[in-house]
Amino acid sequence: MDWFTDRHFYLLAVVVYGLSMIYSLFLWRKGFRQDNRVSYLLLLSAFGLHTTAMVKRGFSLNHCPVTNLHEATTFAAWTIVAMYLAVGLWSRLRFLGAFASPVLFGIGVFALMPSLDAGHSPSVEVASVWTSLHAALMSLAYGAFGLSSVAALMYLTQEHNLKFHKLQAIFSLLPPIQRLEALVGRLLLAGFLLLTIGLAIGAYDLARIGDSQSYRGDPKIVWSALVWLIYLGLLIMRWKFAQRGRRFALGAIGSFVFVLLTFWGSNLLSPLHNPRAPTAPKGPAQAALTQARNLELATRGSRYLLMVQRC
């Protein structure tokens, strides 16, 4: 047995995420009164294992590893860790890892389900550059949304401490709630911009498909548009109607929970993103077009066989 496959590296990464989650429980009990370097180093180690797993999977596929639910989920979790490691360079924001570890561990355990890592059919066309770029930007957007929800949870914790445990809030090393609120807003804005660009590239890539009309009403496309509208509403609520503080934090958390709960279902129901999904019954015009194409392919095949026989 090969013990150095991408699955084994990812399993090790999930184990380290679990260790970071356990250590985070001690930080919670101590009221975040000591620096979070251990948790940061644990997540950095898990990030190295996670990156190795993705690189090995990418080289085995010769393109960006986002071709099934397992790969899309691991890519989204990887972006959350990468963004946290960048933000965590500031010691006052390093405690985001204590809030992110349980989320990463839960996503990691879910992604290990064998049914999510379906085999790649050799008949599936290799993803184009635009498709890979679309998938990467969408994953980065989900990573930004995930980290914003973690910052929002951190905001609610600090707000609760200020209301009921003032001494704990004073001695805590958590950043001020004003800075946390600004961080939630900036991460949401970054994720929204990435999501918008990713959807635009996906629309362009879909327009290049000859039979793109058949994908109208695709569950994943409808779901992505709904997610875009939800986060647009959150941003408008913040900057236009000055809805800040607790409501805005709860909105960021609730929106990402919605994404987590519906992401896999929308993929499973989408014939475009999941070729094994059941397709809707075709209308008369589409059925006639498909029949004409099949007839044309059969005619070409017959002509080719005839030429071979003459030779």
Image (cartoon, grey):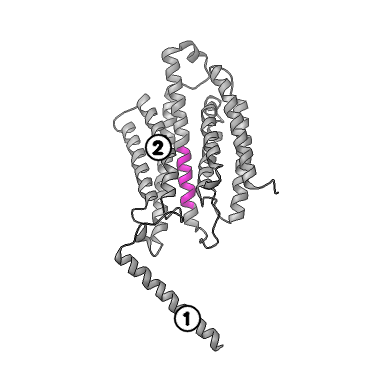
Q: Which residue is mark 2?
A: 258
Position in image of residue 56 (x %, y %): 63, 49
Q: Find residue 300 and report its horizontal and vertical position in percent.
A: 45, 78
| Rendered position, 267 above or below 252 | below
Q: Secondary structure at mark 1?
A: helix
Question: Does 7 sit left or right of 290 as displayed?
Answer: right
Residue 198 seen anywhere in this rendered image of the structure: yes
Q: Earlier in the sequence, mark 2 or mark 1?
A: 2
Image x and y of residue 240, in percent = 29, 33
**Quarter of the image where the C terminus is located:** bottom right
* Residue range of the region highlighted in magenta in the rendering: 133-144
The three-letter amino acid code for the residue at tag 2 is Phe
Report if the CB atoms under discs 2 and 1 are less than 8 Å apart. Answer: no
Q: Residue at x 47, y 50 (%)?
A: 135
Question: Which residue reaches farthest bottom?
Answer: 310
- The amino acid type, in three-letter code, at marker 1 is Ser
- Mark pair 2, 1: CA separation: 52 Å
- Residue at x-position 37% and y-position 60%: 212
Q: Does residue 294 appear left or right of residue 79 in this picture? A: left
Q: Which residue is mark 1?
A: 302
Density class for disc 2 (Cα within 10 Å; few <14, some 14-19, many ≥20) is few
Residue 304, x across and y down, in percent: 50, 81
Task: Please identify the dominant SS of the magenta region.
Answer: helix
